[in-house]
Image (tube, helix red, strand yellow):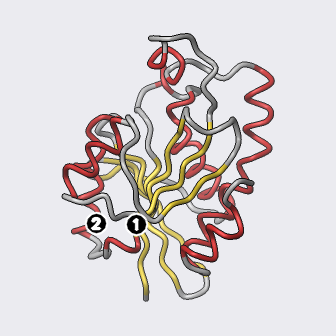
């Protein structure tokens, strides 16, 4: 059975729960809920699994904090014997308009410290990433405050509406493949 490692980036702790930087965790929570699975705490993160159309989805929310995500990704990739092409990293992106999805086969970290650490630990940029736009509505020098800030009421409502689409895109990655998923969901 083909295994996929879906990693939602975020930070552990109640103070980060509703921040823009925790989109990866929130999207994986939605996916787990839709597939009636729950997360259990394991080495370097919270893990859940489900099967869909002959594929095993391993969901990981690293407990290493955002900037050290690579350690958890590498550990679970090796433990579950999951090939690089079957990994999808789910993260926020300030360079994309709020709510827009962008899935790519590879790329730079784009200033994202979680992605930088993953690239460093995997020794490559050749892994799929799912970027969820949070917009760049912050003043110069305030990016950290913005991504670690909580959603306003309007953003939170719109974000909740986008969660099912994000979950569908992840299942599509596993079942229909990367190219089909990019064609279907990019820009949505």
Q: Residue at x 29, y 72 (%)?
A: 80
Residue at the (36%, 49%) spot, across then down: 108
Position of 28 with respect to 4 (left or right) is right
Query: SS for tag 1?
Result: strand
Q: Position of residue 175 (x, y in %)?
A: 59, 80
Q: Which residue is mark 1?
A: 87
Return the residue nearer the eye: 60 or 69. 69
Please count the marks in the image: 2
| Mark 2 element type | helix
Left or right of 79 on screen, residue 38: right
The quadrant of the picture occupied by the N terminus is bottom left
| Residue at which label 2 appears | 77
As rendered, which of 136 and 173 lies closer to the eye?
136
Residue 112 occupies quadrant: top left
Residue at x-position 59% and y-position 27%:
18
Residue 66 in the image: state x and y as whole percent.
Answer: 35, 36
Residue 31: % across, % down: 62, 58
- Position above or below: 107 against 168: above
In this rendering, position of residue 40 left or right of residue 94: left
Which tag, 1 or 2, sits closer to the chain's start?
2
Q: Tell me the mark number nearer the camera, choosing from 1 and 2.
A: 1
Residue nearer the viewer, 63 or 127: 127
Mark 1 vs 2: CB contact within 8 A: yes
**Crowd class of label 1 (few under 14; some 14 to 19; many from 20; radius 10 Å):** many
52 on left or right of 65: right
Residue 171 versus residue 15 in the image, above or below: below
């Amino acid at each position: 059975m083909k295994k996929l490692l879906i990693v939602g980036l975020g930070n552990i702790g109640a103070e980060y729960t509703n921040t823009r930087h925790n989109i990866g965790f929130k999207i994986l929570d939605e996916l787990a809920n839709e597939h009636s699975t729950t997360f259990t705490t394991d080495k370097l993160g919270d893990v859940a699994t489900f099967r869909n159309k002959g594929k095993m989805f391993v969901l990981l929310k690293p407990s290493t904090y955002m900037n050290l995500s690579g350690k958890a990704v590498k550990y679970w990739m090796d433990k579950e014997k999951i090939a690089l092409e079957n990994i999808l990293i789910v993260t926020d992106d300030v360079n994309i308009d709020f709510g827009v999805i962008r899935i790519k086969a590879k790329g730079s970290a784009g200033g994202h410290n979680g992605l930088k650490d993953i690239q460093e630990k995997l020794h490559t940029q050749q892994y799929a990433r799912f970027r969820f736009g949070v917009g760049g509505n912050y003043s110069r020098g305030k990016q950290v405050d913005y991504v670690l800030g909580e959603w306003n009421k309007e953003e939170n409502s719109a974000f909740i509406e986008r969660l099912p689409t994000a979950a569908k895109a992840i299942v599509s990655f596993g079942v229909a493949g990367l190219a089909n998923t990019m064609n279907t969901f990019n820009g949505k």
